[in-house]
Amino acid sequence: MALINCPRCNKKVSDKASICPNCKYPISSLTESEKHQNQNSRDYVDFSWLKKYEAKKYKTRNIMIVISIFLLAITITSGILMGIYKANGAAILFVILILSTLTVTIFVVGFIYPKQCQMLTRVYENHLILLFLGFKKYLVVDDQVIDTCVFNRNLKGLTKDKLLIKGRLHTLSGAIDIEVNRLP
């Protein structure tokens, strides 16, 4: 029995396990060569650059919180100014309602967003592959972005050493996966 890293979550798991106890990835579906490669190749792969993609989730959240604070300030200011200038009461309520709704929505989304981001990593022939799914989606190999999009659910790219990499977000299940093929 050997410990390998799960291709999805990078946690240590037994090569005899049927699924990863952390992310439920089907370890039993890996071939013996993939398990052996996974076990040996991790020693030569640089994982340090993954931290900046983890930080992207929280940077977006912080921006949303600042925007919501700004909108809250505008809401309060507009309410005070409309009260001072004796504007129509219905207009005051309408503006305050719209701005406060925007404020709360952006604030709540700012806290939910990091939990909605998904990151999947996989090691293949000493290459670290990252599929990052947030508002913007990235397919990254060894800290080099090879594809990015906003609306598409499929990313693909070709590395210098002829690896065709495809990342997919499955619409119905929400599962994400990475497929790697070596071109001749």
Image: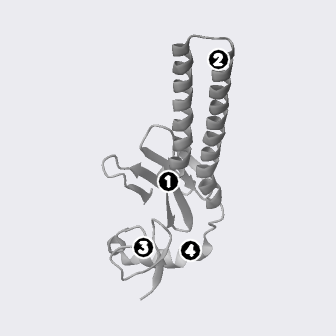
Q: Earlier in the sequence, mark 3 or mark 2?
A: 3
In this view, which residue lies farthest toward the left?
172
At 61% from the left and 36% from the top, the residue drawn is 68
Which labelled disc corresponds to residue 115?
1
Q: Amino acid at mark 4?
A: Arg
Q: Is residue 21 above or below residue 79?
A: below
Residue 59 is at least partly visible in this image: yes
Mark 4 vs mark 3, foreground winner is 4
Q: Amino acid at mark 2?
A: Gly
Residue tagged 2: 83
Label 4 residue SS: helix
Q: Earlier in the sequence, mark 4 or mark 3?
A: 3
Mark 2 vs mark 4, foreground winner is 2
Q: Position of residue 81 (x, y in %)?
A: 68, 18
| Quadrant (top left/top right/bottom left/bottom right) for the C terminus | bottom left
Q: Position of residue 134 (x, y in %)?
A: 51, 46
